[in-house]
Image: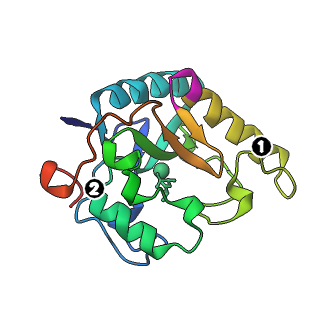
Amino acid sequence: MLLPIKETAGVILDIRYASDNNFVGRAVYARPVALLHREAHAAFVRALARAQVLGLGFRIFDAFRPIEVQSILWDAVSDKTFVADPALGGTHPRGIALDLTLFDLATGEDLPMGTGFDAVTPLSAHGALEGLSAEVIRNRALLLGLMSAAGWDSYEPEWWHYNLPDGDALPVLSAADVPEGPL
Ligand SMILES: C[C@@H](N)C(=O)N[C@H](C)C(=O)O
Ligand SMILES: [Zn+2]
């Protein structure tokens, strides 16, 4: 069973695949929901508690992604580094991945991260340095620290993607498995 991330003072749901503001160019979700496997949900709550101490909240771009949509994204992107191969299942379709950024609770403004969500460029990598400001490098490090301390693994090419480790034994879920899900 997957658990929902609910919109609260510290959480904005900005589910991009339920809008046309994504690299497919059209909505590929019917509903803007963010669901997570129980352990991932607990790890998110831990990260949120730590972020809130710093006056920060999370803007959520994506969480559970039905395997059907993983295939749509795979077909839509030319650089396959930026989408997990649906033939392998991936972490979003197992409910153990989150795409997210930080916002300032006092102003509501997102922290600058240098590139946008799903920007297919080497500048989106954690290891990128040239062309990024000190503020951006600090903000990415802050997100990385908050998520890592809560048990999440990062993904080198994408500053926004985090997943729980060791999820290969978990089932890969389709839309039919999750009627309350995004499709
Ligand atoms: C597509 C992007 N938002 C993402 O989540 N990429 C990783 C690699 C994935 O598909 O698991
Ligand atoms: Zn992701």
Q: Is residue 178 left or right of residue 159?
A: left
**N-terminal-most mark, 2 or 1:** 2
Q: In this view, does 40 lie to the left or right of 38?
A: right
**Total marks in image:** 2
Dot 1 crowding, Cα within 10 Å, few <14, some 14–19, many 20+: some
Dot 2 crowding, Cα within 10 Å, few <14, some 14–19, many 20+: many
Specify whether tag 2 is near ligand 1 (CB below 8 Å).
Answer: no
Asked if the magenta segment contains residue 96, the reply would be no
Please identify the quadrant where the C terminus is shown.
Answer: bottom left
- Tell me the tag on residue 66: 2
Q: In this view, does 175 lie to the left or right of 21?
A: left
Where residue 129 sits in the image (x, y, percent)? Answer: 84, 50
Instruction: Report the front residue among 114 and 7.
Output: 114
| Mark 2: secondary structure | loop
Asked if the magenta segment contains residue 149, the reply would be yes
Q: Which residue is drawn at 57% across and 21% down?
A: 149
From the viewer's perspective, is residue 158 above or below residue 19? above
Q: Residue at x 38, y 58 (%)?
A: 87
Q: Residue at x 27, y 51 (%)?
A: 33
* Camera sees residue 14: no
Q: In this view, does 143 lie to the left or right of 61?
A: right
Extent of the magenta region? 148-152
Instruction: Report the front residue among 29 and 139.
Output: 29
Q: Which residue is drawn at 58% across and 38% down?
A: 154
Q: Residue furthest right?
A: 130
From the viewer's perspective, is residue 110 above or below residue 169? below
From the viewer's perspective, is residue 76 above or below residue 136? below
Residue under label 1, please give it: 137
